[in-house]
Image (cartoon, rainbow, N blue to C red):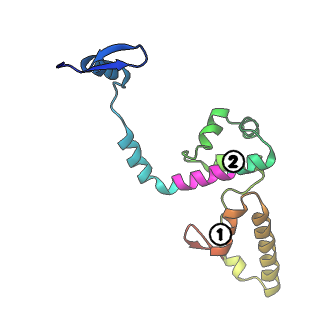
Amino acid sequence: MYETKLILNIWRYEPMTITNMKEKIDNILSKEPSRWMEKALRDEANEAWLERSSNIALRILGALQLNGMSQKDLAEKTGVSPQQVSKLLKGNENLTLETIAKLEAALDIVLIAIPESVSGGEAELSTTQRQTKSASRFRETKTLLSAPQGRAAEKVHESGSVYGKEVN
């Protein structure tokens, strides 16, 4: 019997000892330690905004498809590089308000809806003025629901909340 097992190297059709195979594997593997745990911990700590970022990315992709636009077209309209658009569409970017505003303008959609708060001046409005303002908000909401991001807006409308906060 043989003391050292011979393994057939399929790619070169030559016998290879376990030692030779181990050397080849060591040469293929990265010399840097894996950072998967570090990335997993970062993702867990940032789970809330990462989920929102991925939802925004999905809405952007839907709007691109609906408008027949490419990522390159979006990059040109927003004034950012195609590489940056690609990163945004992966859903791992912490978007700034400036970037969100550029995307909304370029795609003619609303990515983040911020409910209006009742100000002191609004509390003093007459009944007719309040009804007029309410009707205006209703039309705005109806417009938002018909936009490409409709499903997310429907969830807000159905639940009456945005990220756990009640919408008036």
Q: Position of residue 137 (x, y in %)?
A: 77, 72
Three-letter residue code for mark 1: Val
* In the foreground, 80 or 131: 80
Mark 1 or 2, nearer chain start: 2
Question: Could you tell me residue 101's position as x and y percent?
Answer: 69, 50
Question: Measuring 78% from the left and 41% from the top, which residue is drawn there?
Answer: 69
Indicate whether 149 appears above or below 89. Answer: below
Location of mark 2 (residue):
61
Q: Is residue 166 left or right of residue 142?
A: left
Kind of residue indicated by mark 2: Leu
Residue at 68% in and 36% down: 80
Indicate the position of residue 119 as horizontal and vertical percent values.
67, 75
**At 67% from the left edge and 33% from the top edge, which residue is drawn?**
82
Q: Residues within 10 Å of mark 1 (few under 14, many from 20)?
A: some
Q: Is residue 83 above or below residue 99?
A: above
C-alpha separation, residue under disc 1 versus residue under disc 2: 20 Å
Dot 1: element: helix
Q: Is residue 59 visible?
A: yes
Residue 19's tag is none
Q: Is residue 39 left or right of residue 58?
A: left
Q: Is residue 39 left or right of residue 4?
A: right
Q: Residues within 10 Å of mark 2 (few under 14, many from 20)?
A: some
Q: Main secondary structure of the magenta part?
A: helix
Q: Quadrant of the N terminus?
A: top left
> Dot 2 lies on which element?
helix
Q: Which residues are magenta?
A: 50-59
Name the residue tied to disc 1.
156
